[in-house]
Amino acid sequence: MEEIAPLAEALVAEHGLTTMLTSVRRASRDLVTAPVLQAPPLPVAFPLGARDVREIGLTHARRPPVEVRPRVLGPASEPALHYPLGDGSDAGALVGLQRLAAHLRAGVPGTDGRG
C-alpha cells in the first residue's frame, strides 16, 4: 500500500486534492459482487488536502488520536497530510478512521466535533 502516498502527493500538487479515502475489500478476480452481505471495505489511507489542513489547523491535524503519524504532502507553505491507517487486513482500521475523523472535525472552528 506504499504506492498510495505518492499518488496522493501527485494529486495534491497537480490537482488540489481535497480528501481521499482509500480502502480495500475481498473480491473475486472477475470483480463480480455476490448477492450476499459482505464485510465492509477496510480503510488503508486518508489524505487530507491543504485547504482542510489550513481550516483545521496544522498543529491539531498533525496530532491525531491514532497510532500512525501523518506524512506531510506538498509544499511546506501549504501542506496536505497523508494518514496511513493500515494494510487492509485489520478491521480495527475502521475504528482508527472514526477516531481520526472525529478529531479532525473537532478542529474545525464553529463545530462541536460531532459533525
Image (spheres, rainbow, N blue to C red):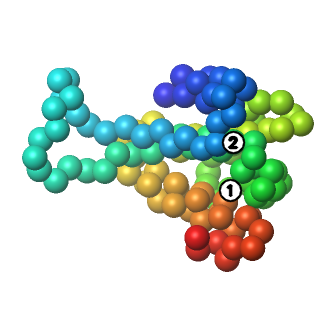
Q: Residue furthest right?
A: 77
Q: Is 56 left or right of 88, judged from the image as shown?
A: right
Front residue of 20/41: it is 20
From the image, state whether disc 1 or disc 2 is nearer to you: 2
What residue lies at 83% left-to-right and 38% top-to-bottom?
Answer: 78
Q: Residue furthest front?
A: 15
What residue lies at 62% left-to-right and 51% top-to-bottom?
Answer: 67
Q: Is 23 left or right of 34, judged from the image as shown?
A: right
Instruction: State the image coordinates of residue 24 (x, y, percent, origin top left).
Output: 37, 37
- State the SS at label 1: loop
The tag earlier along the polypeptide, 1 or 2, is 2
Asked if residue 79 can be seen in this view, the reply is: yes
Q: Name the disc covering residue 46, or none.
A: none
Q: Which residue bears the numbered disc 2?
A: 49
What residue lies at 54% left-to-right and 22% top-to-bottom?
Answer: 3
- Report crowding for label 2: few under 14, some 14 to 19, many 20 or more residues within 10 A (C-alpha): many
Whether residue 28 is situated above or below residue 81 in the rendered picture: above
Q: CA distance from mark 1 to mark 2?
A: 16 Å
What residue lies at 72% left-to-right and 26% top-to-bottom?
Answer: 13
In the rendered structure, which amino acid carries the disc numbered 1? Answer: Pro
In the rendered structure, which amino acid carries the disc numbered 2? Answer: Gly
In what quadrant of the picture does the C terminus appear?
A: bottom right
Whether residue 4 is situated above or below residue 69 in the rendered picture: above
Front residue of 99/36: it is 36
Q: Which residue bears the numbered disc 1?
A: 64
Instruction: State the image coordinates of residue 99 (x, y, percent, origin top left).
Output: 56, 62
All told, the count of numbered labels is: 2
Instruction: State the image coordinates of residue 14 (x, y, percent, origin top left).
Output: 69, 24
Whether residue 20 is situated above or below residue 60 in the rendered picture: above
- Report crowding for label 1: few under 14, some 14 to 19, many 20 or more residues within 10 A (C-alpha): some
Q: Residue furthest bottom?
A: 112
